[in-house]
Amino acid sequence: MPDLLIELFSEEIPARMQRRAGEDLKKIITNGLVEAGLTYVAAAAFTTSRRLTLTVEGLLANSPTVREERKGPRADASEKAVGGFLRGVGLTRDEVEVRGSPKGDILFAVIEKPGRPAVDIISQVLEHAIRNFPWQKSMRWGTGTLKWVRPLQSILCILSDDSGATVVPITAQGIAADNKTQGHRFMAPKMITVTGFDDYRVKLKRAYVILDPDERAQVICHDATNVAFASGLELIEDKNLLAEVSGLVEWPVVLMGRINSAFLELPAEVLQTSMREHQKFFSVRNPKTDKIENFITVANREAKDSGATILAGNEKVLSARLADAKFFWENDLIVAKSDLSIWTKALKNVTFHNKLGTQFDRVKRIEALASNLALAVGADIKEAEEGARWAKVDLNSEMVYEFPELQGTMGSYYIKASGRSLAVAVASKEHYSPLGPSDSVPTAPVSVVVALADKLDTLTGFWAIDEKPTGSKDPFALRRGALGVIRLVIENNLTLKLTRFVELQLLRHEIEINREQASKDDLVVIEGVAADAATDGVLPATISTILDGADTQIGGLIPSIQKSIEQVSIDLLNFVYDRLKVYLRDQGFSHDVIDACIAMDQDVDLTSVVKRIKALSEALKTDDGENLIQGYKRANNILSQAEHSSGVEYSYGADLKFMENDEERALFAALDKVGADIAAAMKDQDFTTAMTAMASLRMPIDAFFETTLINADNEIVRRNRLNMLSRIRTLCLSVADLNKLDG
């Protein structure tokens, strides 16, 4: 069985496109081969900055012959019907068969499609792939029509077996395929003739080209770590940069340079970001000083002077870059040490959203919400307010203008320089977190408060103006924001009822949205509601109380705002709970257990929901827990059928004097004891104890069903037993909605 080798050689392919291009080449070619009848054993794609390579092993030499039968009309059908059938199968009347059937003679066409040589199929599939390759961005060059990411220079396409290698004939943009490639652009530019993939890979390495991007990355990481270690330094890991640099070079040569001492006092994040973004340098830390003092660059060739000239040029360019960064840093420090409010006032000129005001407006809302959240989180109220007030302070700094990815980080430096507390400074750096599922979650109380306030303000704001995610579109990253709220609450084990804070912030948005059309009296009442709600509890009740006592001539806007807040709050909290379900499924919990616990009263804190889910999951892993569910469902089914048929509600409690056997009385006593245990445990939010207590009902319920006939002839006994079942249902549902459980 022959092996196929394809190489598409071009000018430099952007590093960010290489891995995706290799996957696309493999998918397009192998799918095309299989569709044409050529199966294979294995396939692998490789990329460098100048080539896409695909190897396919164990390919069929020819596609198999295919025999197909098609049934046509009756032999005596109309000439028009027969003619249409013949044209469809591409045969004449003499070439089709006539076969007898109970309904008369039927025409059958037997079509044989002979197999095709692999060379012909590969040529067709590869040409189609080149002409239709899904580059993210592509270009045309010269007078041709072919589009490629960069000008295509050569095509290598050979089919090899024990008898030798055959060039697959294909021409694209005037480039004919052959069995030749090129080595390294500078170190081995001569043409190389290859006979198969193993030969190709070995000869490329001799020509200073490492074909496998993972191997190049390993070489870079290994050599960089060793070079730094040899000088008593530490390489700072950067996986994204490593992946990018491994796509920029074909023969990586690691060189370590030194940062000019004039720039060593710059914050480490500034040095690292500037070197990574502008120069693609790795940062190297001195463990003795804990400062970034060196850098590692990866050259694409071996130099006669061991890289001294390359390093000298890189150090010169880096110094120019860092001189700009130092200028920005020093200018920003002057502002930070004199008056930070210059930057916060400037936020009045920065629009957050045309319907939600400026960044200054947003900071004011976040500050107000942070004050409300501080007590629930356990943070100092003044520090929480201050943390929110200065969290966005660096958005107008020169450094963040140059490096937007440093927002928050630079703010922490400037806040410390202004003489404010460490907790406030750290909050600026951490309040954007978590940015994703793998990002760490802040744990410092002030940071948690500001991060929660920031995300809740964003969510409530966009819900207030009806800019919610739709389908796969989420331009404002609201799903990520909701997940951030969930993780902040759960991973910090916060007891926090979201409803109150969501409604409170929605009211603040409604005040701003309706400010122009509202009367002064309306605004006085509404803003009073916001102030009272911050301390009095659930918002709608507060609005209703003030509305009831308000002058009938004012408050005309309040009912519509109240209704809007109630509806929007429910919708937003449902969205948060949907994201919670996704988060919990990713944690390994089953969907039915999640639904059983989330179906309970949603005006609870997320941490309690998760504790309940964990406790129910553990309970269901035990025999008692699993069997109790079956007993509960049996009780619920019998009770539901009785309620449906008689139209009577059996919720008045069983009476001990109407019980006829010991099992009834034992269950009655167990329900009394377990009911008290569950009530106490639920009050303390000790869900594990509550679930364990509920599971202990398994044996008395089983014994009850084994010995007791529910539908007794005596109507009083029957009703008493149904009331017992009702008590089982009520008690179990107080812990979780067991009806949601599968099985």
Image: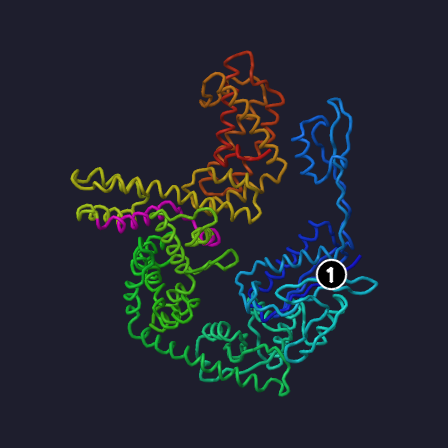
**In this rendering, would 573 be left or right of 218?**
left
Residue at image point 25% right, 48% down = 514
Q: Position of residue 459 (x, y in %)?
A: 38, 51
Q: Quadrant of the C terminus?
A: top right
Q: Residue furthest toward the right?
A: 163
Q: Nearer the viewer, residue 695 or 519?
A: 519
Residue at image point 55% right, 41% down = 591
Amino acid marked by disc 1: Leu
Q: Which residues are magenta?
A: 487-516
Q: Residue furthest toward the front?
A: 79
Q: Residue furthest toward the top?
A: 713
Q: Position of residue 449 (x, y in %)?
A: 39, 57
The residue indicated by pointer 1 is: 4
Q: Position of residue 690 (x, y in %)?
A: 51, 39
Residue 322 falls within the magenta-colored stretch: no
Q: Nearer the viewer, residue 662 or 640?
A: 640
**In this rendering, would 269 be left or right of 156?**
left
The quarter of the picture where residue 366 lies is: bottom left
